[in-house]
Image: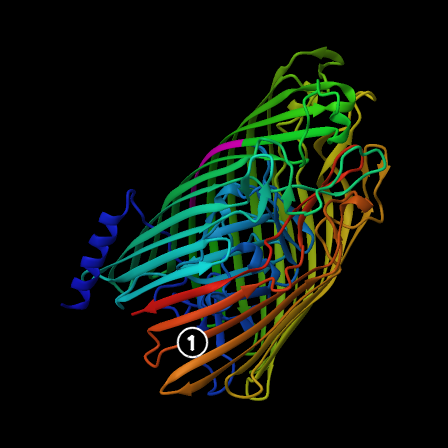
Amino acid sequence: MGTRSNLTFALLAASSALAFPAFAQTPTAPAGSAAENGSSAASEPGGLEEIVVTAQKRSENLQTVPLSLTAFSGDTLEKSAVTSIAELAARTPNVSYDTFSPGQPRYFIRGIGGTASGSARDGAIGIFVDDVYMGRPAMTGTDFVDLARVEVLRGPQGTLFGRNVVGGAISYFTLKPDDEFRAQAALTLGNYRRIDGNFLVSGPISDTLSAKVAVSSRNHNGYAFNETTGKDIEDEQSIVARGALRFQPNSDVDIQLNADISRLRATGNWWHLLREGPNSIGKSNADPRRGRNHTDDGFSDVDNGGVSLNARFQTGIGEIASITAYRESTSSTRANTTGLFVAPLTDPNRGQFHHTLFIQQSDVDSSQFSQELRLASEIGSDISTVIGLFYFHENVKSTDITDYRFVSRNSEGRRRFDGRNKTDSYAAFANIAWDVTDELKLRAGLRWSLDKKDHVAVAGGNNFVPYRDGGVIVPGFTAPGKDSWDAFTPSLSINYQATPTKFFYASLSRGFKSGGFSDTEIEKLSAMTAFDPEFAWNYEVGMKTEWFDRRLRFNASLFYTDYTDLQVTVIRIVDPAFPPFGTTGNAGKVVIKGAELEVNAIPVDGWNIYGNYAYTDSNIKELVVGTADLAGNRLGRSPKHKFFVGTSYETEIGGGYKAAARVEYTYSSSFFSSINNTPVELIDGQRSLDLGLTLTTPDDKWSVDFWGKNMTDRLNINTITEVPLRDGYASFLPPRTFGATLRFRY
């Protein structure tokens, strides 16, 4: 049976095995480029591989790109058993990540970040999958089954990207089907009853048509246990399916239809009373991952799906690229964010239990449409240009529900906020590169962005802080609001290729994050009033070098970011008899400066040493929140020191069989979970030791990976939340996990 028949049979079998359609998205590297299905290309014998990226919308060696950029091939992530964005962030300079719940991730790059919470607030970090922007946090969970590569760009982006981002971008590129038949499958077994499985089939159907199907399933029991309900907390069951049809009638046309669908079911995060405040009448559980909690275990239900059409045409005026995409997302998350068990208000012994209860639920339904057009042209032999247009439309409906109980005040109830927002975003961007000489190059870009938002906030239920309309207490309100913002954001860089292996650059760029509205205001006028955009100027110098016949790679950069109109949670005291209330507003000026180093070396054949280090000083110059002056504080989730180091050694063990051992260690110094910088919110240094051993058959078709993560079982903190009485509640990263993965490739 021929290769095409094999693929057709495999596709039909896969389709009949699925209860829903499964098609996926594709990378945006130029057709036929070395970066299509990976980020590496062969280099000097015995030396480091060349890393090929498309951050500037053309295939380039990472060592000649004037950006702070870290790239991982899908093969590299697989060898390190990286299966989540949290593990990826730990391995990347100045990138951090946390979750309020599995469906509410927050991304941070160089201290800039947060979440696109509510219906009308944008994220500072852009997440792209095959050049498609993911507008809501729940959309950004990406499975690693068919990744070609991941590119992490630090600093403002916008003169080459469809959607402007102020802090940085994380771009995922999936494998593209082509005329090579490939199939792979993997089965993972681990502690906490982990059972993961995935398969991928890709290859030609005819001379002009190729296809891909990839499916992944992940399942594990909970990392914590609620003695009240007798159930595990922080379990997970997820399934992701992607597929693609690629049409290439000739070398000038490349059209790909992609689709994907995913489903996540999990309980909420486990929250532990880590630090008891001076007024606390609660008591921590003896075991931070086990104890009495509320009868509500919470949940996280997330469903995503989308289609895109990526088309490229080689014409007489250059390459025209069109990316058309539509996506939908539904997420519903609920968690007891103050942990512990809360007795009924009528219980005479309630003093032995905790005084406050917050069970928070967030439901978000969103849909988005985006259209991007780009033209990449060459003007003579010295000048190249990229010009583009971008349109983004988004509809979001959100509901935030909080069940609360204040034992000390004999008060309980449920508050509810509903938000509805429509966003229309327009942009035009252009970038020009001029090769002044063979060694000296200049690049300049300019972007114009216009964002329009139409918003309605509805406040209701029984809030613990009474709603107000013009100073008058009301049972609730409906508050419409509408606003728009536009901005010009330029970029400029100069780079010098001193030798074939020594590259130097300097750049400046401006970032813009749109304004918006808050869904959770208690005053009608505030709900109708928009907060302003954020702006950041980033200045950077860097070097990318290779030594000793490309056996050592050393890259370094220095950056300085001037950040203004920071969108922060402003604490308001509306009524002294009740806890303060947080709302989004603009305040302050922040200066962020630091250095980043990346090293990779092959001292002898088979032995690889790799790592990176980041130093960051995020100094708040001006920031008044309520009555507190926060000047001198640091940004949240911004450790001063963060490093990752690893080493691996591969050798033949006889009969053609190979063994590869791996040791990796991640570390970050202490940091605060928010800009308030209170002692309660201080997160101590994070550490994790990962180990791995891989055995591979002589034909490279079969392998087994034995892996372990967080082998010292350190209690690393995901995030800490401080409640009004200065209690600190923490959720945690996974404990020690270990297992084995059996892989097959054809």
Could you tell me what secondary structure mostly forms the magenta stretch? strand
Q: Position of residue 27 (x, y in %)?
A: 40, 58
Q: Position of residue 661 (x, y in %)?
A: 52, 77
- Could you say which is closer to the camera, residue 271 or residue 283? 283
- Could you say which is closer to the camera, residue 243 or residue 688? 688
Crowding around mark 1 (Cα neighbors within 10 Å: few <14, some 14 to 19, many 20+) is many
User: At numbered mark 1, what does the secondary structure look like: helix, strand or loop?
Assistant: strand
Q: Position of residue 724 (x, y in %)?
A: 78, 32
Q: Position of residue 330 (x, y in %)?
A: 46, 35
- Could you say which is closer to the camera, residue 256 or residue 450? 256
Residue depicted at x 43% and y 86%: 653
Q: Quick check: 681 left or right of 117? A: right
Whether residue 207 is visible, yes or no, is no
Image quarter in which the C terminus is found: bottom left
Image quarter in which the N terminus is found: bottom left
- The residue lying furthest to the left in this view is 1
- Could you say which is closer to the camera, residue 369 or residue 428? 369
Magenta residues (range): 363-371
Instruction: Give the vertical position of 208 relative to 225 (above or below).
Output: below
Residue depicted at x 75% and y 20%: 348
Q: Is residue 367 magenta?
A: yes
Q: Amino acid at mark 1?
A: Leu
Residue, disc 1: 695
Image quadrant where residue 506 sits: bottom right
